[in-house]
Image: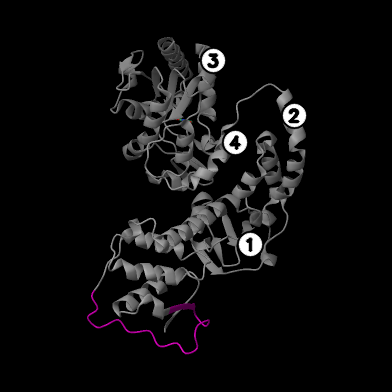
Amino acid sequence: MQVVRLAHETDFDGWREAARRLRTGGVAPETALWTIDGAGDLFAEAMPAAPAAAPAFTVPKGFVELADRVILHRSDERFALLYRLLWRLQGEPNLLRILSDPDVVKARDLAKNVSRAAHKMKAFVRFRLVIDPAEPETYVAWFEPAHRVTEATAPFFARRFANVRFSILTPDACAHWDTKGLTFTPGADPADAPREDTLEDYWRTYYASIFNPARLKVAAMQKEMPKRYWRNLPEAGLIPELIARAEARTQEMVGQAASEPTRRVVRSALRASRDAPFDGQAPTTLEEVAAGVQVCRRCDLWRDATQGVPGEGPARARLMFVGEQPGDQEDLAGRPFVGPAGQMFDRALAEAGVPRAQTFVTNAVKHFKHELRGKRRLHKTPGTGEVTACRWWLDAERRIVRPRVIVALGATAGLAVFGRPTPIGQFRQQSLQLSDQAQGVVTYHPSYLLRLPDPAAKARAYALFVEDLRFAWGLAA
Ligand code: URA
């Protein structure tokens, strides 16, 4: 038996090096025993040195990505399973494509569990402010991930809270961000985590306000927010009471005027499908678009955004508006045009007599592109590559809604809708034929109106904007 001692539970480099040496040394998987340093067979043999003229070998890129995930799983089998796959790849180079193979099934399953644990960590880490007069303001979270995803997930929090010092303590490892770099220390004890603070109230209020009793499905909710995470979630204390009162609250709501389910509720219902890998199939419903946008990796903008923001409105709207990309508030709310530009847009729509609820409002790019300036997230114009990558979603929305008229708000939307630059001064008030049977109209972006410094110029542009909205509504009628 060949015993391999790895330095720690997530020692991917150690596993790679050992696996390379075992494979080139011809050590079959069933004769290799993988242990963490100090826990192994006392009679372990020394590792074989790689043969002097060991032939180099390569493995499919997909294998490295798979192994990188699988290694974070808590399963004791993971190292052996990966080495067995590596060994078999010598004679079966297409092994990873055989989705019925038990080793492949197992590895994909472990990788999926790890991805889900990382996703839950992003959703359920709750920071508490720690005040120590001798130290700068720091937020600390205690979290117990289902798998060893702390190091892999910490960069997400560093990007998201770039200007805030924080530590995430977990039993496996602790991540510390000092606004410049990430460092890691060994796992901690729950007693190291701070207790209550004012942020708890914030979370409880937020959760109670988004909880919709009429849509309560206890099993689905527990699947999405498994009980193992409850003890570290401030809002979890509310759950039993909210569940108990759900029936009575539902009756109250039924008695009230009907309202559209919020985008947030729809999203949470779709969250289960989020974890499914995006398979490149064109979406055929707006729900699929909404779910797909959340897992989209067609460009890098997802990394720093809170969430993707799909379009919203009736699936059979005659008029579609396409903006540029979500702004700061849209990114947080998950809905298009709800911030300052959205308010300007709403005012102009009302003046033009266009009911927004009968239109479909979306953006050329579905994630918020921005740069950090101090604590502020400043809008950055998306590039042609991002617009092109995101056309997958806009085109899907166009195919599904099939509007009669599509209005491009501003130059970026013009590029996405018409596929070429469409100068507003030259083309406004014209109906331009689009390939999908729709008529295209181009007008100003509401943010442009907001930015105009001269009040007279602003009033003139605003009047033209209202005129263009009225023109488009007339065309769609
Ligand atoms: N600007 C846009 O283009 N879209 C939004 O959703 C908000 C601001």
- Structural crowding at the residue carrying mark 3, measured as other residues with C-alpha within 10 Å and reported as few (<14), some (14–19) or many (≥20): some
Q: Nearer the viewer, mark 2 or mark 1?
A: 2
Give the structural element (helix, strand or loop) at label 3. Answer: helix
Give the structural element (helix, strand or loop) at label 4. Answer: helix
Q: Nearer the viewer, mark 4 or mark 2?
A: 2
Give the structural element (helix, strand or loop) at label 1. Answer: loop
Determine the CA span between mark 3 and mark 1: 52 Å
Amino acid carrying label 2: it is: Gln
- Provide residue 271's location: percent of width, then percent of height: 54, 43
Which residue is located at x 32 percent, y 29 percent? Answer: 415
Q: How many marks?
A: 4
Which residue is identified by label 2? 251
Sequence-wise, which precedes: disc 2 or disc 1? 1
Determine the CA span between mark 2 and mark 1: 51 Å
- Provide residue 119's location: percent of width, then percent of height: 53, 52
Amino acid carrying label 4: it is: Val
Circles 3 and 4: CB distance less than 8 Å? no
Q: Could you say which is closer to the camera, residue 459 or residue 208?
A: 208
Q: Which residues are magenta?
A: 33-55
Sequence-wise, which precedes: disc 3 or disc 4? 4
The prevailing secondary structure element of the residues shown in magenta is loop
Amino acid carrying label 3: it is: Ala
Determine the CA span between mark 3 and mark 2: 34 Å
Give the structural element (helix, strand or loop) at label 2. Answer: helix
Q: Residue furthest bottom?
A: 43
Circles 2 and 1: CB distance less than 8 Å? no
Which residue is identified by label 4? 265
Q: Looking at the rendering, in which quadrant would you find the C terminus?
A: top left
- Residue 135: mark in rendering: 1
